[in-house]
Structure formats: C-alpha cells, structure tokens
Image (tube, rainbow, N blue to C red):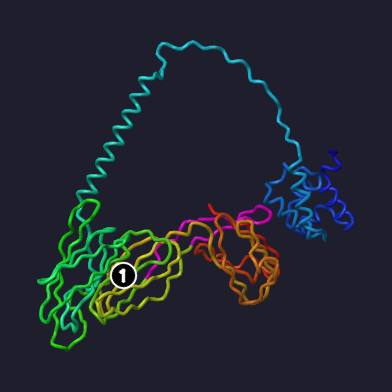
Amino acid sequence: MTEQALHKLGEVLRSAREERGVDLARVERDTKIRSRYLSALERGAYRELPGAVYTKGFLRNYGSYLGLDTEYLVDLYRLESAAAPIDRPSVQAPPRPIASRRSGAFVITPGAVLAALLTVGVALFIVYLVSEFVTFAGTPNLTISRPAGDVNGYDGDEFTFEGITEPNATVTAETATRKTEVEADEDGAFEITVDLRPGSNVVTLVANDPLTGRDSEEVSRTILVGDGGGSFAPSPGPELVLTTPEEGATVRGPVEITGTGPAGATVTVTATPTAAAPATFRITTLAGQDVPVPSRLPTAPEPLALKIAEDGSFSDTLALAPGAWTLAVALDGDDEPISRDLTIAAPDGLAGTLRVGAAASYLEIDEDQVPKPDVSGRIAQAGTDIGLSAQRALRIRVGNAGAVSLTINGVNLGPMGGSGAVVEWQITRL
C-alpha cells in the first residue's frame, strides 16, 4: 500500500478545506478543535491524536464543518488506522551472566511449599469451623408483623398471622385446642391461619430452622373474639416501631419504610440530606477538556405521610438521590421521632434524565456506543424529557446547549452550555 493511498483521508480533508479557502487556524476557531489535531488528521499521523473515540468525534465535527459525509470519513479512518504500521525497534536482550547462588539466599524447596500449603489449609479450616459455629449457635429469628400486638373485639372464627423468619423454616402456631404448621418461603416470609373460638385465644408461635435444627424464641398473641360485635383492632402496644431501614444501612434504589404503631394513626417520614455523594462519572468535551462535576447536597423530597393499617402495620417506599441522609419517622403530634442515618448508593451504571427546556434542540445520544432509538439524530421539542441509561458511557451532542439540561446519577448538571451553542459531552463511569 502506497503512502498516498494510506493517507487518503488526510487528502480528502485537506482538499475540502482548501476549496473553502480557510486555514487550520480558522478551522480551530470555528470548530474548537485544536489545530495540531486537525494537522494530524490531514497528515494521517494518528499516533498524535488522543484516542479512537476522540478521533472519531473530531472527524464528525470537522467533516460536518467541511460539508462532507462524516460516516464515510469515519470508515476511512478505521481502514487507515488498522493498516498503519507500528514501528517497534527490535533490540536483542544482552546475555545474562550465570550468577552463583549466595550462601544466605532464600531457596524455595518442595518442603517449604508443602508447609505453606498446609498452613493455609489449616487457617481456612479454622475459619470454616468458626463460621459454622456462629451459624449453628444462633437462635432463629421470628418476627410477627400481623398482628402487631394483641387483638381485642375480633369478629371471626379464624385469623391469619403474617411474619418473617429463616428461609424455609417450619412455623408452628399452637392454641389450646389445635396445632398448625406451615413452611416459610425462600425469603423467610410466611402466613399461617388458626381457628378461633369465642372468648380469649392465646396463640403461641415458634419457628424451627431446617439448617440448624434450632427453635426460635416463642412469640404469643392474644386474640379476644367478641359476641358478634366489634372489628379487628390491635390493642394498644408500643407507640411506634420502625422495622426498616436499619441504622447505617446502605441502600441502592428506593428505601423501604416499614414498622408498626397504633391503628388508624398517621406516621410522617421526613428525609434530610447530610452529605453529597462522591462523583461516580467523568465528563469530557469533544476537545478532551474536563467538565467539572458539581458536588452539592441532593434536594430533599416532600415529607411522606403514612396511614397505619388496622393490623397496626405501615409500609411504603421513598426515592432518594445518592448521598447521605437522615430519616425522621414520627407519629403526628409526637416531638420525639425515630431517627435513622443511611447512605443511598449510586446505580451500577449511568442513569439520568435529559430535559429540553424552553426551546427545541437537535440531539445525538449514544448509550454504550448505541444510538438511542427515535431520539438520536432528531430535533426534540421544548418540554421533552428523555431517560438515559448506560453501563459504561454516554455520548450526548446537542445543537442548542442552553436549552438542554442533564441529571446523571442524581447529580443535577444544569444546562450543557450557552443558547444556540453546539456542545458534545462524553460521560464515562468511573
């Protein structure tokens, strides 16, 4: 392959530029691509360019400026960069002298290797024994979520208990007249229905863990069946119990809020941000310049009001942006809420929203190098919201940067640039 054929891409670019009557300095001012990169493209000096991703971006920008078919230019670049020779000087390694072993040098012998392997094996066996002891010595958990406490004035001849225990454990509910068993599911959740008689019914529940063969602590509930009157109403118990989230928990996704309290009361959940999440991605422009990622506290949502059900339980989820938060859960009129500190982790990849504000804008969006269907290469109208999702990288090019704002992994990046500006960002997961 001749040098002229190898650098056909450079000839195409240089010829088109000369036909327009502009020099490299003028092209640099118009496209914001450094002249040394433009010169390297025209000379076919691909080693002087920052990398394949940026080179393709330069080509698309430069080709669009010259009125050329940008995909044709990218194809030429792929062919030429793949065919370009790589100069690697061949240097023969000098012969190494045969050094005699010093008398005090460390020598690895088969016996030393065997001793090391035995030591590691014994250590692993001890760790295994300790873990098994902890597993088998522990008492299985048994938590009854329905009912939260004793029940007065119940009108019915049977009642269904709900709760959580060890996975696949056998749960036994025993009354004065009958014993009933049920197996919990693989997550430990269970429901068990017992028959009732008029008057006071004391129900004792216990769970047996099939892995260890041990029984949980017994949990008792008293259900008072009235003479045809009254509805299901838990007796007064603890004013408020917050089951989840746990103190210091790290959560990815919506936060599950569960607990128990007086039936019919209202619980208010307030979330307060305490620290911003560390940066999880990097932003670079088409010219290879870094765009600062702001570090600011996430916005607090409106307080969440939950009605406690007749069985004394409450549950809901709360979506929070990545960062550190403090949850305060309180009954209405209670000045002493239950507090939980937790951390919201960023998603595994890149997730967010692109919003087109007061004016329309041309968009190009690649998610992991795949153009976004029905969006990329089109004009988005004002007021459009577009969801973004990628595992490794996002490429976003806009024709009216002042009208386009981004939120990535819970971080509000604001407008991408000035009104009418053509801006391209490469967002990469750290």
How many numbered marks are there?
Answer: 1
Judge whether residue 289 is colored magenta. Answer: yes
- Residue, far bottom: 229
Judge whether residue 93 is colored magenta. Answer: no
| Residue 324 vs residue 134, the one in the foreground | 134
Using the rendered view, name the quadrant where residue 121 is placed.
top left
Q: Amino acid at mark 1?
A: Thr
> Which residues, given as a range, are shown in magenta?
271-295
Q: Which residue occupies 29% across, 65% down? A: 189
Q: Which residue occupies 19% across, 73% down? A: 194
Q: Is residue 313 above or below residue 184?
A: below
- Whole-percent x and y of residue 31? 75, 58
- Whole-percent x and y of residue 32? 73, 57
- The residue pinned by badge 1 equals 258
- Whole-percent x and y of residue 383? 61, 77
Using the rendered view, name the quadrant where residue 314 is placed.
bottom left
Decide if residue 293 is on the left or right side of residue 341. right
Decide if residue 285 is on the left or right side of residue 331. right
Secondary structure type for disc 1: strand
Q: Quadrant of the N terminus?
A: top right
- Whole-percent x and y of residue 56? 72, 52
| Residue 135 vs residue 428, the one in the foreground | 135
Decide if residue 302 is on the left or right side of residue 361. left
Using the rendered view, name the quadrant where residue 427 is placed.
bottom right
Q: Is residue 393 above or below residue 191?
A: above
Q: Is residue 115 above or below residue 66?
A: above
Rate crowding at label 1 as few (under 14), some (14 to 19) or many (20 or more) other CA atoms within 10 Å. some
